[in-house]
Image (cartoon, helix red, strand yellow):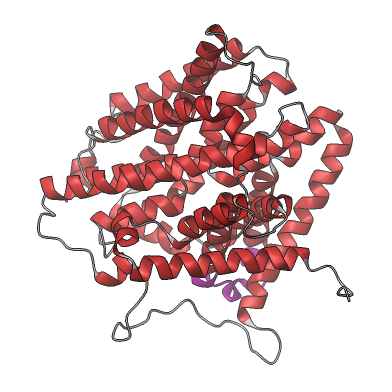
Amino acid sequence: MPPPFSFDPLLVFGYLSIMLIAGLLLRAYIPIFQKIMFPASLTGGLLGLLLISFDLVSINVEIVKTFAYHFFNFSFISLELTSFKEEFKVKNEQKIVKGSVWMAIMQAVTFPLQAIVGSMILFLFFTAGYEPMFKTFGFLLPLAFNEGPGQALSIGSVWEGLGFANASTIGLTFATIGYFFAFFVGVPLANRGMKKGKYQNQKLPSFFVRGVLPKEEQPKSAGFITTHGSNIDCITFHMALVGMVYIITYFVLLFLSNLLPTDAGRIVWGFFFLFGLIVAILLRVLIERTTQFGHLMDPSLQRRITGFSVDYLVVATGCGIQLFIIGKYFVPIIVISAVGGIITTLTVFMLSKRLQNYKLERAVAIYGVVTGTVSCGLMLLRIVDPEFKTPVAREIAFMNIFVIPIIGGLTCLLNAPFWWGWSMFTTCLVLFFILVISLIILLSRVLWKDDNKIIKH
């Protein structure tokens, strides 16, 4: 007898959960996984991909992609619901805002660079007589590497409605390859930097390598309880804030999409995360400044919700790839990813050499961000700064404030061929102009020429 209700969404959630637990156990007990230090979400996602691809598990992949899309939006909303008051205080005392600005401008360099590289390689494929691909195929590289799987899926799904077949699956594939760069390239580079520098005798704690705390390790608090259980559970309150922002954002976008032409209306839904974070900021400020309930919003608990969203986003990314689709585009995907990844690697580590302080920490942190996600950046940072004694971890958090207009504007620019009818050449020309301006700022050292007077390492 069939169940009286639809279980498909929760079956997918359960499957993703099992893959996360499997990833955790593999990292905890198998040395090879400890050596490459893949997070449980990535290992679980790849395992889930194999099980689905070989028909060992029957799961609706479209629902998996839907999960990835919504968890991506959840992560941005939860991030902006988190108060940065303490970070502001610390940064003002230590004067490390410049590090955050440097990271944000690094994204203004790597994003257009990846877009231009992807487009140029695609043009070479066309010239060589390779089977024609959609014009924005190469633009999925920066969406996947610089913004992560959620945005590659989000914009990719919108582009599918505009004629780019299988764009979401291709975007998820690019994002997964980006994770491989973050860990297979980022981890060895971090270890190499440690051996060459003052970290020669530094050893990562075993619980970090295994990814689980031992019994004798003192557990850390996940946050503070700010509500009374007789009324509402504290985690329920924080999740409810995310849900409130989500529903407000939904109706805002529904209204805007109905005002715009059909094509533009579709693309707007790809920017749900951007509208969501704006609504989240406004709601947080409103609660903190006009009500007596601002103290109920605990940053630590909110960060746990953000981490929860990112973990499920990443595991869904791996499970959402359909191998039979990407097989057709295997060669261009690999070539674009390899060239883009190598150029990104060289760019990040060459530009980071011009910093006066925390060169290695800032380099590996931003490298993880521009090839994977902020979580990847924090994980690579943890290798060279296990106790987060440097200010770089806080710089990553603070960076999100500066990078919003940069990433939002560049993402809009990638849609210029659809919105404004720009040619790919014109779009890449504008991207190149932004790249040059960003490089001038970084190379001139206008922002950080006195950095050595601010913080001594």
| Res 299 visible | no
Residue 84 vs 104, above or below: the answer is: below
At x 29%, y 55%, the residue is 94
Quadrant of the snapshot with the N terminus: bottom right
Per the rendered image, the range of residues in magenta is 288-301
Q: Residue furthest bottom?
A: 230
Whether residue 361 sits left or right of residue 261 in the image: it is left
Numbered marks: total: 0
At x 45%, y 24%, the residue is 113
Q: Nearer the viewer, residue 323 or 268?
A: 323
Whether residue 120 sits left or right of residue 393 in the image: it is right
Which percent across, then down, holds residue 21? 50, 70
Instruction: Residue 80: say if magenta.
Output: no
Q: Nearer the viewer, residue 104 or 27?
A: 27
Q: Nearer the viewer, residue 336 or 30?
A: 30
At x 53%, y 30%, the residue is 330
Instruction: Specify the quadrant of the image occupied by residue 255.
Output: top right
Which percent across, then down, holds residue 236? 66, 77
At x 36%, y 70%, the residue is 28
Which percent across, then down, holds residue 176? 50, 44
Q: Main secondary structure of the magenta part?
A: helix
Whether residue 395 sits left or right of residue 243 in the image: it is left
Residue 137 vs 207, above or below: the answer is: above
Residue 187 vs 258, above or below: the answer is: below
| Res 352 visible | yes
